[in-house]
Amino acid sequence: MSVPRLAVTVDLVVLTVREQRLCALMWRRDRAPYDEAWSLPGGFIQLDEDLPVAASRLMAERAGLADVRIHLEQLATYGYPDRDPRQRVVSVAYLGLAPDLPASSRAQVLWTAVDDLIHHDRAAFDHRRILCDGVERARAKLEYTSLAAAFCPPEFTVAELRRVYEIVWGTVLDPRNFHRKVTGADRFLVPTERTTTRDGGRPARLYGRGDAEQLRPPMLRPPPERRVG
Amino acid sequence: MSVPRLAVTVDLVVLTVREQRLCALMWRRDRAPYDEAWSLPGGFIQLDEDLPVAASRLMAERAGLADVRIHLEQLATYGYPDRDPRQRVVSVAYLGLAPDLPASSRAQVLWTAVDDLIHHDRAAFDHRRILCDGVERARAKLEYTSLAAAFCPPEFTVAELRRVYEIVWGTVLDPRNFHRKVTGADRFLVPTERTTTRDGGRPARLYGRGDAEQLRPPMLRPPPERRVG
DNA sequence: GCAAAAGTGTTTCCTTTACACCCATGT
DNA sequence: ACATGGGTGTAAAGGAAACACTTTTGC
């Protein structure tokens, strides 16, 4: 029997925390279908290219982020037959977590607040769904991994890390208990000798990312009644 | 520019607990490449078929499990260029968790202990890697979801559920603390009026699966020093 | 009666939570 | 001086771990 062959793309959900909001890197479409809608940056994979390689390439080519330091992990694969009206496309989505980097020089690529994208649904194809899945993955992973630090610059304060949690989760966390939890966690943070007053008040110690991946025991999101935003 | 088109398959990692071991449903190959090696059941997706539909179809056709009650979730997608020596194939893996059902009537399809598969590596293609990823996903999900019950028949005792945890994790758990944890968890278990003595000793209450998906707070695996097996 | 497994009680320990309070800077 | 945020202390609440003990069956 003959084997069906399909177009395969990689789409990127690249998240960052910017101006007190969770933002995704979105591509402004300039042609049909979904002309002028926002889509996730992505593209077809090449015949000799592994999936993570394609994701990195597209991160540079389409998202304008050639930097290797960005955390990239596979999110999920979407393949229902009519998700692209032109042809059948199976799309492997990758999730990227980035510090607040300057956006691409292209006007077409912009950091856009996730809340706006989700509530107003101006996303092309099934990209709203993919974006939601990426956001939920990020929210869940902050609980039991050290990935929140991927949203921070190489050196950051505990308060900056806390703001990542608060913005991604839409909650308020107690600064004092948060401090104890993350500084007490094994290899989550590596202290430096330096401090900063860029957030005002008493100087805060600067930390770098440790090599722990897991956070055990996890830091659970507060139950919904305490949510904010 | 021309769009490359690739063959896309769905591969199934179907796990169960059988005879005190974690087992996967494996397909005995009878042709090159990897003649006589074990592979995951799977097949090409059809042109008009969504991915979960293809997974269900292959679960019936190739795995011999037409039953809908089996938990099925997407695992990951594997696509490095030479993973199949014949042609480039992108494979979307699904993870299935099943109770100890009679295996398929086909002699080609057999429940095989995961330990043996992993340690002796008689798996075709990159299926050992996919199997490992599926097993690790299952182990992790027992911690913070109620998925362990997916390995149990419709009615089961707390001790049977505990054995699932012990076998999947390769640990020993305290029966008394485990009992309190799972019976106290919200909507994890729904008690029936019935009891059984099939495990010997004092009659044990039979429970059905509740509708909770999350288990919060999670039940963390004991640290490695307490591992068994 | 005895073995075996179910299930409860209890104590200890650890983590989280809530919040009082002090510290070190900029203005 | 005082506002601002950083960081520590501490007590109460909750869950996990360890284990003694009772219950209910089969043999």
Image: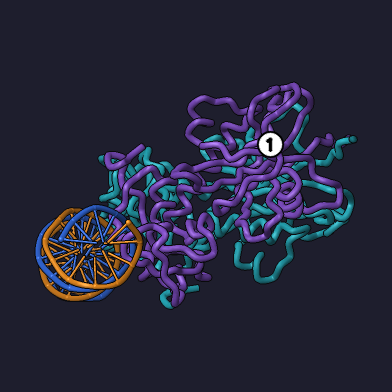
Chain colours: A purple, B cyan, C orange, D blue
Chain of the residue that carries numbered disc 1 in the rendered image: A
The percent coordinates of residue A30 (x first, y second) are 73, 26
- Residue drawn at x 75%, y 36% as measured from the top left: B45
The percent coordinates of residue B58 (x first, y second) are 69, 39
Placement of the N terminus of chain B among the 4 image quadrants: top right
- Residue drawn at x 53%, y 70% as measured from the top left: A211
Near-viewer residue (B156 or A166): A166
Q: On the image, numbered disc 1 is attached to which residue? A: A107
Near-viewer residue (A30 or D23): A30
- Residue drawn at x 42%, y 63% as measured from the top left: A157
Image-based side of B23 in relation to A106, left or right: left
Image-based side of B29 in relation to A73, left or right: right
The percent coordinates of residue B179 (x first, y second) are 28, 57
Image-based side of A3 in relation to A175, left or right: right
Q: Could you say which quadrant of the image residue C11 lies in?
A: bottom left
Figure check: C20 above or below A41: below
Near-viewer residue (A120 or B27): A120
Near-viewer residue (A205 or B185): A205
Q: Secondary structure at mark 1?
A: loop
The residue type indicated by label 1 comes to: Ala
In this rendering, the count of numbered labels is 1
Q: Residues within 10 Å of mark 1 (few under 14, many from 20)?
A: few
Figure check: B171 above or below A133: below
- Residue drawn at x 29%, y 49% as measured from the top left: B185
The percent coordinates of residue B184 (x first, y second) are 26, 50
| Residue A112 shows in this picture | yes
Figure check: C16 above or below A93: below
